[in-house]
Image: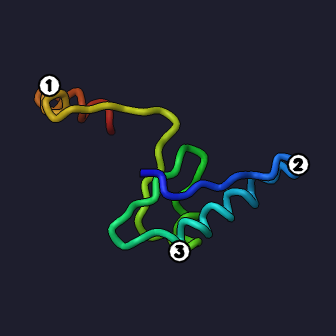
Amino acid sequence: MLKNAVVTDVKTNDSVADKQELYRQVAIGLEEDEIGVFDAGFKLVEAAEAGIEQCVIRLALNCTLTVRSFFMLVKTNQWRDDHR
């Protein structure tokens, strides 16, 4: 469930300050049993520096991998060949 969002000031267009404000708000409001979810463009190091210990940062490309498809890749050695 969306708990918080940062509305940017369109007159200043300062993406660095906007990110810092978002990290600050998440660090303050994130409960122990919650996970912050950030979109591509955010960095794990920046989140950690802001004091956020539990978060997920989505990559620019999404990947769907089911358990069955994973085991089929392993069985055919395609997983090992593709991830060397």
- Which residue is nearer to you in this view: 34 or 63? 34
Of badges 1 and 3, nearer the viewer stands 3
Is label 2 in contact with label 3 (beta carbons under 8 Å)? no
In the image, taking residue 67 as reference, residue 35 lies left or right, namely right
The colour scheme applied to this rendered structure is rainbow
Asked whether 80 or 31 is in front, the reply is 31
Q: Amino acid at mark 1?
A: Thr
Q: Which residue appears at 74% of the width and 57% of the height?
A: 16
Residue at (52% x, 69% y) in the render: 48
Which label lies toward us, 2 or 3? 2
Judge the density around disc 1: few (<14), some (14-19), many (≥20) Cα neighbours within 10 Å: few
In this view, 70 is above or below 8: above
Q: Is residue 5 left or right of residue 14?
A: left
Q: Dot 3: what SS?
A: loop
Of badges 1 and 2, the one in the foreground is 2
Looking at the image, which residue is at 68% across and 64% down? 21
For the residues labelled 1 and 3, the Cα–Cα distance comes to 42 Å
Which residue is drawn at the image coordinates 74% and 52% (left, top)? 8
Q: Quadrant of the C terminus?
A: top left
Q: Which residue is identified by label 2? A: 11
Q: Amino acid at mark 2?
A: Lys
Is the residue 39 above or below the residue 21 in the image? above
The answer to whether mark 1 and mark 2 are in CB contact below 8 A is no
Q: Mark 1 = which residue?
A: 76
Q: What is the secondary structure assignment of the residue under circle 1?
A: loop
Along the polypeptide, which appears first: circle 2 or circle 3? 2
Residue tagged 3 = 51
Residue 79: image location, x then y, percent? 24, 32
Q: CA distance from mark 2 to mark 3?
A: 29 Å
